[in-house]
């Protein structure tokens, strides 16, 4: 029953406000939404769902992080002087254009003199990380998406606390959602013992919901500015396969030494300043960085800030240059049409393309949404494989046995445009061969046209409906 006040209905009184809010929201969408599909969707929402559509757009559609992150640009500019120009290098041949492009894209130099070692699962990764923490003398920088309150999480906390009590400067960043929505017991434990620990875009009140989609997905550890770790391994018991966890996760991480460590430290400095407003100084860098190996490497970061799309563009440029082979391993395969086109074109020009995804991920809706992507790739000649359990969380790309791209980024829109990610590009034939063979060993079950065609219409409807959520999965 309609309520009236002074002869005017509530709906009638609110109508001018509804029009004004929807109009203002539409102006904002037209000015700031680059993706036409997203813009059309949001415009439809703000007009078809009075007030609710505007509220949803203000909560989830506005990139406030981009504005805040502009403060970081000057913070980053000085760090390039830390690394000596003598480590800067180029690459001959057809990959030379990729080096030049990523130089401009990332704002970081490709550096010679690095040593890289693969670590598989928590079984190899955690002992190496804990040993490095125990041997730290000056500084420890740790950033992770998940830091569980379990056996291994507390082992890390205890090691970090011991280092702090021995005079090492310890800085820890965890994600405000991935490591606990309301609180992170390990962060509480660290703070009680004097360790500086921050939570990235953590919120407990409704107005913080505007940041819920923007997470730091980075997994980085830097010790004394000389040793580093990067990859996909979070900190939790589920990654230690030898202990037969209830929900096992297989993954890949990397141990680093050499000049590229300065770029890892620099990316952490930016995140730390973003969260705490504390500017870390040159003490987190090595005073005399030495050559440790022959790998040419560079850190590439991405996020919904000044780094928007940099990891995605690096991948697209590398894929477009491939001449012989592409091998990809990712836990979530939800790229957009542009990415699918570049991969398909590589296969059509004769490049051998293998894409390895889990048989079952930890998010069934992602598995459903990924299936519609398979048909055009198979049609182009790509080979898609499923790796049997345990769930494999590795994020690896190898091209032509030369170039590798590893780190925290999945092959999905969330990683490319919403999450804060850190990857490492490497020109290293030895590393590329190890990863090429590793991916090859996990080609367990081949996906065929028959597998896609035999799905019932309800399953196809489910899968296509799930794909509509692609930007947020």
Image (spheres, rainbow, N blue to C red):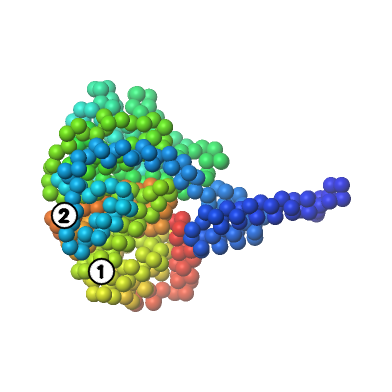
Vertical relation: 194 (above or below) 146? above
Q: Where is residue 278? Give x, y as percent.
A: 39, 30
Please indicate, yes or no, whether residue 235 appears anywhere in the rendered image: no
Name the residue nearer the viewer: 455 or 118.
118
Q: In the rendered view, does 72 fall on the left or right side of 431?
A: right
Q: Looking at the rendering, which quadrant does residue 227 occupy?
A: top left
Residue for point 51% across, 63% down: 36
Residue 151: numbered disc = none
Q: How many angstroms separate mark 1 from mark 2 (CA)?
A: 20 Å
Residue 428: numbered disc = 2
Q: Where is residue 244? Give x, y as percent.
A: 26, 47
Residue behind mark 1:
353
Mark 1 vs mark 2: in front = 2
Name the residue nearer the viewer: 409 or 332.
409
Q: Looking at the rendering, which quadrant does residue 169 occupy?
A: top left
Q: Where is residue 462? Give x, y as percent.
A: 47, 67
Which secondary structure lies at badge 1?
A: strand
Please indicate, yes or no, whether residue 399 appears anywhere in the rendered image: yes
- Image quarter where the N terminus lies is bottom right
Vertical relation: 68 (above or below) 90? above
Residue for point 53% across, 52% down: 61
Vertical relation: 11 (above or below) 263? below
Q: Earlier in the sequence, mark 1 or mark 2?
A: 1
């Amino acid at each position: 029953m309609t309520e009236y006040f002074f002869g005017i209905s509530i709906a009638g009184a609110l109508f001018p406000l509804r029009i004004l809010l929807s109009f203002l929201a539409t102006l904002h969408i037209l000015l700031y939404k680059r993706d036409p599909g997203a813009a059309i969707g949001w415009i439809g929402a703000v007009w078809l769902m009075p007030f609710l559509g505007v509220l949803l757009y203000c909560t989830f559609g506005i990139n406030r992080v981009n504005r805040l992150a502009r403060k970081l640009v000057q913070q980053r500019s000085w760090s390039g002087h830390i690394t000596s120009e003598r480590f800067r290098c180029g690459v001959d041949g057809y990959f030379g254009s990729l080096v030049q492009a990523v130089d401009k894209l990332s704002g970081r130099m490709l550096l010679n003199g690095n040593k890289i070692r693969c670590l598989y699962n928590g079984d190899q990764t955690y002992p190496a990380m804990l040993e490095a923490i125990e041997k730290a003398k000056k500084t420890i920088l740790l950033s992770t998406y998940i830091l569980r309150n379990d056996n291994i999480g507390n082992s890390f906390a205890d090691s970090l606390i011991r280092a702090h009590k021995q005079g090492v400067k310890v800085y820890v960043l965890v994600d405000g959602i991935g490591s606990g929505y309301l609180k992170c017991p390990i962060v509480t434990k660290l703070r009680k013992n004097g360790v500086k620990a921050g939570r990235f875009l953590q919120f407990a009140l409704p107005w913080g919901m505007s940041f819920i989609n923007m997470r730091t997905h980075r997994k980085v550890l830097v010790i004394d500015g000389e040793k580093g770790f990067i990859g996909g391994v979070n900190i939790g018991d589920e990654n230690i396969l030898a202990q037969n966890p209830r929900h096992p996760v297989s993954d890949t991480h990397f141990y680093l030494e050499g000049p590229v460590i300065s770029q890892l430290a620099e990316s952490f400095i930016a995140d730390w300043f973003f969260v705490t407003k504390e500017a870390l100084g040159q003490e987190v860098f090595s005073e005399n960085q030495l050559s440790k190996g022959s790998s040419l490497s560079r850190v590439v970061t991405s996020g919904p800030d000044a780094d928007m799309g940099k990891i995605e563009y690096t991948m697209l440029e590398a894929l477009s240059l491939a001449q012989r082979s592409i091998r990809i391993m990712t836990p979530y395969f939800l790229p957009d049409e542009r990415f699918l086109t570049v991969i398909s074109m590589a296969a059509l020009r004769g490049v051998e393309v293998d894409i390895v995804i889990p048989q079952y991920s930890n998010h069934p809706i992602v598995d459903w949404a990924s299936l519609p992507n398979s048909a055009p790739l198979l049609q182009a000649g790509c080979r898609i494989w499923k790796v049997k359990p345990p769930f494999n969380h590795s994020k690896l790309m190898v091209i032509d046995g030369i170039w590798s791209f590893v780190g925290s980024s999945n092959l999905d829109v969330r990683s490319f445009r919403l999450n804060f990610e850190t990857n490492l590009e490497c020109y290293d034939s030895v590393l590329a061969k190890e990863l090429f063979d590793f991916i090859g060993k996990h080609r367990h079950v081949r996906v065929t046209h028959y597998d896609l065609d035999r799905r019932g219409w309800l399953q196809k409807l489910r899968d296509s409906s799930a794909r509509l959520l692609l930007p947020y999965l």
